[in-house]
Image (cartoon, rainbow, N blue to C red):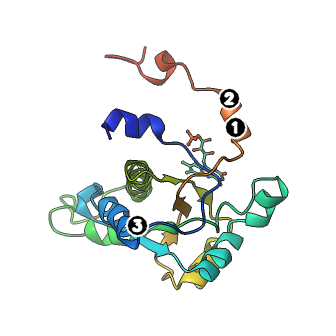
Amino acid sequence: MEFRDVVMKRRAVRRFEEGGVDPAVIERIARLAQRTPSAGFSQGQRLVVVTDPGARRRVARTCGEEMYADLGMGPWISECAAQFVPCVSAEIYHRRYQEADKVDDEGREIEWPVPYWFVDIGATTMVIMLAAVDAGLASGFAGAFDPAALQAELGIPDEFVPIGVMPVGRPLPDVRSPSLARGWVPFEEFARFERWG
Ligand SMILES: Cc1cc2nc3c(=O)[nH]c(=O)nc-3n(C[C@H](O)[C@H](O)[C@H](O)COP(=O)(O)O)c2cc1C
């Protein structure tokens, strides 16, 4: 698929067929997701990929799946081919930026102007979404309402924050988000050439 088509076809899908995807395809998406940049090549991003149906249901509960079901959206977080759970450790970045090539003249870690660990896990997330589309699949994103419960369910170490749960699978007709009624910000507001003002 053309890159432009992959980008334009991507959307947050909220209903999937149960299973039905070759595990090799799921692994290929995970392998592509690893090829994401990171500040200082810290590589603080990790993925947990959940395919077991019972585990998927328990994971979905930590994201408030019942609430979505009550809104008529169905069990879109548990029913899918696999859940991708992107996790990130700020500690890995702090440790990396205490290495000799990263410390300042006084040997201190930089003051972080931006928490790059969340930038990097966002990039990982985007590769998952685009790789799913490229594989003829789709993905969604459910915020982790209870990250501690998600950590406990999946055995994720304290150091790693699970930023959400991404169901991946064959898309089914779904309920579109009411947020989309906001429409896109005009391109001229989003992008300015040469100077902001
Ligand atoms: C960081 C992030 C968090 C999101 N959290 C949720 C969520 O908790 N529940 C949900 O239904 N959609 C969630 N979404 C999906 C957005 O609502 C969706 O991406 C947005 O409305 C734009 O729609 P589109 O992705 O189809 O273009 C999230 C998306 C992002 C990037």
> SS of the residue at dot 3?
helix
* Alpha carbon separation for disc pair 3 and 2: 33 Å
Seen in the image, is 73 located left or right of residue 32?
Answer: right
Residue that sits furthest to the left in the current view? 101
Tell whether circle 1 marks a residue whose Cβ is less than 8 angstroms from ligand 1: yes
Q: Is residue 165 visible?
A: yes
Nearer to us in this view, 118 or 156: 156
Residue 48 percent location from the top left of the image? 46, 74
Q: Which residue is mark 3?
A: 26
Identify the residue shown where x is 28% and y is 54%. 37
Residue type for callout 3:
Ile
Residue 182, which numbered label? Answer: 2
Q: Residues within 10 Å of mark 3 (few under 14, many from 20)?
A: many
Seen in the image, is 92 located left or right of residue 51?
Answer: left
Q: Which residue is mark 1?
A: 179
Tell me if label 1 and label 2 are in contact, CB under 8 Å. yes
> SS of the residue at dot 1?
helix
Q: Quadrant of the C terminus?
A: top left
Q: Disc 3 or disc 2, which is closer to the eye?
A: 3
